[in-house]
Image (cartoon, helix red, strand yellow):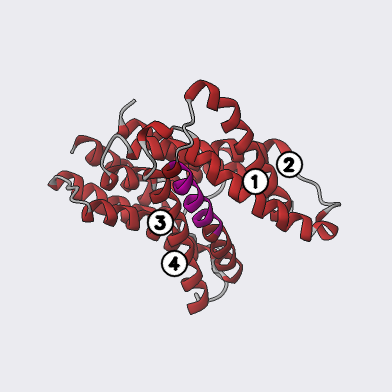
Amino acid sequence: MSAILLAFACAFSYGFGDYFGGLATRKSPLLKVLPITVGTGLVSLLIAAPFLGAQFSQQAVISGLFAGTCGIVGYIFVLKSLGLGPMGAVAPITALVAAFIPFSVGLFRGERLTITGSIGALIAMASIVLVSRSTIDATHPLSKAAALYAVLGGFGFAGFLLSVSSAPVGSVLAPVIVARSVTMVVFCTAALVTWKSIVNSKVDYKRAMASGALDVWGGTTFMLAAQRGQLVTISVIAALYPAITVLLARIFLKERLERHQVVGLFGAGLAIVLLTSS
């Protein structure tokens, strides 16, 4: 499978995963949902490992440990930024940072885009911001602390993507398994610490499990794409996943799209055409 198709698969996996994860956490405590999503993802990887392969070399394990740590940092800071809000302002910051850093690393490595691809990348970056941004719930101004946490969250998620992409080609699922194991231990520990306050809360198990399975395959397909193609291309395509989430919310939840989000969706489509044809 080509790097471009794998990057598309990554975007769809993360987009659907965020959609189901968002539904699962609407009426359930996050620390009760996260162990389920993480556990489901880990189990799905372990089931697939005998068929797809998992070579636990030293470099693969180190990549997985870094990825897991960065992923936890990303979760923590994103949650803190969303708590301070407004969500419509902090979400685009995180998404843009998470896309821009791998893109910049690819350029630093010597990867280059054609003029068409460069235009597509710029349109994609703008589209990420437009699609992710919502002004409906923006009830208070963006604080410096919220912006800082959003940037740090973006660094965390970018670190996860770069870590898994640095794994040896033959390692297959090993880095993602290690990364998911790290997050599993941390989130389960956090859930146990707060168990008394969340034990009686209901959980949408089906959506939480769907989110977890899709999330790990997002990370896996990004790693495989990075091993087959240029980071400057696949990182931008994969980062368009918010467009998938927004479309799903529009279709199934009948959520109203703001004008700039519609523009962002069209921009995302145009960016994909330009990037794949470059």
| Total number of numbered discs in the rendering | 4
Callout 4 amino acid: Val
The residue at the point 35 percent across, 51 percent down is 263
Dot 1 and dot 2 residues touching (CB under 8 Å) = yes
Q: Farthest residue in the top direction? A: 51
Residue placed under numbered mark 3 in the picture? 98
Callout 1 amino acid: Leu
Q: Secondary structure at mark 1?
A: helix
Callout 2 amino acid: Asp
In this rendering, would 81 be left or right of 27? left
Residue placed under numbered mark 1 in the picture? 23
- Where is 169 relative to 146, above or below? above
The residue lying toward the viewer, choosing from 181 and 111, is: 181
Q: Farthest residue in the front direction? A: 58
Residue placed under numbered mark 4 in the picture? 151
Q: Position of residue 56 (x, y in %)?
A: 49, 36
Local crowd at mark 2 within 10 Å, few (<14), some, or many (≥20)?
Answer: some
The residue at the point 37 percent across, 38 percent down is 168
- Counting residues from the start of the chain, the first of labels 3 and 2 encountered is 3
